[in-house]
Image (spheres, rainbow, N blue to C red):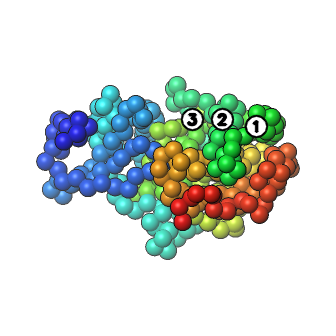
Amino acid sequence: MSDREQEIRHFLVAAGWGDARRAPLAGDASFRRYERLYRDHSTVLLMDAPPPNEDVRPFVHIARHLHGLGYSVPEIYADDEEAGLLLLEDFGDDSFTAKLQRGDDEAELYTSAVDILIDLTARPLPENVPPYNEARLLEEVERVLDWYMPVLTGGAVPPEMREDYRDRWRQALGEVDRLPTALVLLDYHVDNLMWLPDRDGLRRVGLLDFQDALAGSPVYDLVSLLQDARRDVPPDLAESMLRRYIDATGLEEDAVRTAYALLGAQRNARLVGQFPRLWVRDGKPQYLRFMPRVWSLLTMDLTHPHLAPVAAWFDRHVPLERRGETLPGAPS
């Protein structure tokens, strides 16, 4: 038995779940691992987030904040923050993804998800949440240079190309600050939203995977939801949800639409670099299957006038016909 497994067993015994049957759940792009625990007619979830690669304290901090605002987040039944172990409320298997795959009402699900973001825009920030500032935004888009371009070309990006790329993004992203700051949950998409039909109003939406939350543009999570790397969101549905958000928040329309395009491009550029990183560095090639969709979304966002300098960089270094092609050496 590994040291980690012994640590987990001691934690479960102390929490009163030492005799539970354990079943692994699908993982994500992080080092976190999840298990569902069964005992009698009850279930809970174990989050195994081993230090130093993971830290459960941000999850606990944001969960308590969101719970205080009245949203549905998993209750924390037991915790060992130093060991990176949490025992959480089980929201079941009705993720938005599962419901969409069953053919459930797409408009109802997306409307419920957008209404959370509308409400969150006007809510106070938690204490000590890191900023989603220019430095962070630029670091993320540079993953294109650090991971995608070396795989595509077989060599490192020259310093002058990197500086040109950064300058163009820096010029474009200045427009993001036109909107007030709000809590950004960061991974707000249908895989991380649960349907809880026995609850009322906004509480019907269960929130997961918010431990990386930041203080930034309120439009970022709208981008995450409607420009989803994992599934095609019908353009008319995306536009109706964007319209709903603008009308309900009262935010200035041009500022919202500009931020939507800029942050869409930023997020999709990050993923263009992140998915090869997950393959090369972390041995997770499965995310490469999303590359064509991400490239399509990025290309769409780059048509916005404020992104013309960035679009010109991509046109020169990754022309349209090369976007989304299988990367050299990638598994078939």
Find out whether the residues at labels 1 and 3 contact each other: C-beta distance under 8 Å: no
Task: Name the residue rendered at 52%, 25% in the picture.
Answer: 128
Mark found first going from the N terminus, 2 or 1? 2
Camera-nearest residue between 128 and 246: 128
Query: Left or right: 264 with respect to 125?
Result: right
Mark found first going from the N terminus, 1 or 3? 1
Quarter of the image with the C terminus is bottom right
Quarter of the image with the N terminus is top left
Camera-nearest residue between 246 and 298: 298
Residue 234 place in picture, x, y as percent: 65, 68
Label count reads 3
- Up/down of 274 relative to 10, above or below: below
Asked if one can make out residue 256 in the rendered structure from this viewpoint, the answer is no
Find out whether the residues at labels 2 and 3 contact each other: C-beta distance under 8 Å: no
Q: Which residue is mark 2?
A: 139
Q: Amino acid at mark 3?
A: Leu
Cα–Cα span, label 2 and label 3: 15 Å
Task: Name the residue rendered at 57%, 29% in the picture.
Answer: 130
Q: Which mark is residue 158?
A: 1
Residue 62 place in picture, x, y as percent: 46, 35
Cα–Cα span, label 1 and label 3: 31 Å
Q: Which mark is residue 29?
A: none
Determine whether the residue tagged by mark 2 lies in a helix, strand or loop.
Answer: helix
Are there few (<14), some (14-19), or many (20+) residues within 10 Å of tag 3?
A: many
Query: Left or right: 89 with respect to 61?
Result: left
Q: Which residue is mark 3?
A: 214
Residue 133 place in picture, x, y as percent: 67, 31
Mark found first going from the N terminus, 2 or 3? 2
Task: Write down the quadrant of residue 51 in the picture.
Answer: top left
Task: Write down the quadrant of residue 243 in the picture.
Answer: bottom right
Residue 129 place in picture, x, y as percent: 54, 29
Q: Amino acid at mark 1?
A: Pro
